[in-house]
Amino acid sequence: MVDTSPDEIKFIYDDYEHLDSRLLYTVTRIISSDIIESGVDIFEKGCTCVERSCTSESSCTCLKYGVNYRLTENNEIVLDESKFGNVPVFECNFRCSCFGGLEELDTPISDRIEPNRTTGICSNRNVQFGPVKCLELFDAGSKGLGLKSKRKISRGSFICEYAGEVIGLEEAIRRQNHRTEMNYVFVLKEYAGQSLSSVTCVDPSLIGNIGRYINHSCQPNAAVVPVRVNDSIPWLCVFAIRDIEANEEICYDYSGNENAMNENIERNRKPCLCREPNCRKFLPFQADI
């Protein structure tokens, strides 16, 4: 297990582990020393909400960019429809007044958040409690190991973080050029209108969590959404984009639906093994990474 910031992992419950003893398990991202955080006013003070459940009606400052989650009829907390499509999510953080309520809980967070993750907890806190408990590694045949759930996961539910080393783009390029095995580096590009505003690179090749085992599919049932908790560097969080049945493999599109994935370049491309009717034949590839 890898140590991270105490504030970052205080309430994360994650008891998964790697099958390969050569890999180090981390419950959340590891930020490299060369990564420079950009200032976001939300994280300088936090909200002043008295109640544990922050809402847009209460003028919660953490929700000034829009509501992040909603409750279903089954009292499950799921991603709001407006947040699908690479739209950033800002959760309440350890500087917020509603953080104090968590420290007062007399039972472990993990006991309270399953199965609905909502009991007595601010509704704008979700990914910071860690992955769902029902995940399981399995032999996915020619794809290697894969990840599935032992129970149904509802559309919009948080599954797990794609955790690993957060590195700069230059280092990501260097690693890709020198790596002969599977490339696990995930590059998330965020845009403000048509302009590129942020690039986040996460590499779980040697240090990572359960998220590193999620395979690609050209017709995925999950997607990566950037979520910011205690600082401006996003967590890459995997959410269900449709209902995922028990024992169904969890997959997302490695391209993130970006158009600039050089789909027509077949040189040095790895074949896609998703076997979906709309399969693009090759795994997504970014020539400029």
Image (cartoon, grey):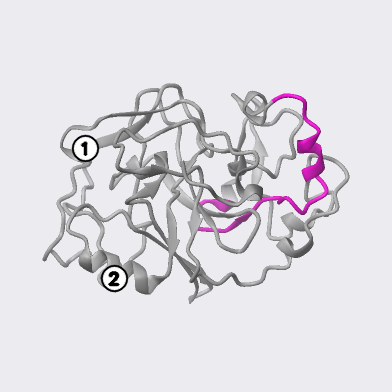
Task: Indicate left or right for 106 with 266 as reference.
Answer: right
Task: Indicate left or right for 132 with 22 as reference.
Answer: right
At horizontal 30% and vertical 42% (from top left) the residue drawn is: 22
Q: Position of residue 5 (x, y in %)?
A: 60, 52
135 is higher (above) or lower (below) than 86: above
* Quadrant hosting residue 212: top left
Observer-side mark, 1 or 2, equals 2
Q: Does label 1 or label 2 sit earlier along the sequence?
A: 1
**Helix or strand or loop: what does disc 1 sit on?**
loop
Q: Position of residue 236 (x, y in %)?
A: 48, 52
The residue at which mark 1 appears reads as 144
Q: Position of residue 19 (x, y in %)?
A: 31, 33
Quadrant (top left, top right, bottom left, bottom right) of the C terminus: bottom left
How would you rate the neighbour count of disc 1 (Cα within 10 Å): few for under 14, some for 14-19, many for 20 or more? few
Residue stretch rendered in magenta on the structure:
83-107
**Helix or strand or loop: what does disc 2 sit on?**
helix
Residue closest to the far bottom: 195
Tell me which amino acid carries mark 1. Answer: Gly
Tell me which amino acid carries mark 2. Answer: Arg
Q: Position of residue 84 (x, y in %)?
A: 52, 51
Residue closest to the far right: 50
Mark seen at residue 174: 2
How would you rate the neighbour count of disc 2 (Cα within 10 Å): few for under 14, some for 14-19, many for 20 or more? few
Give the alpha-carbon distance from disc 1 to disc 2, as whole Å. 25 Å
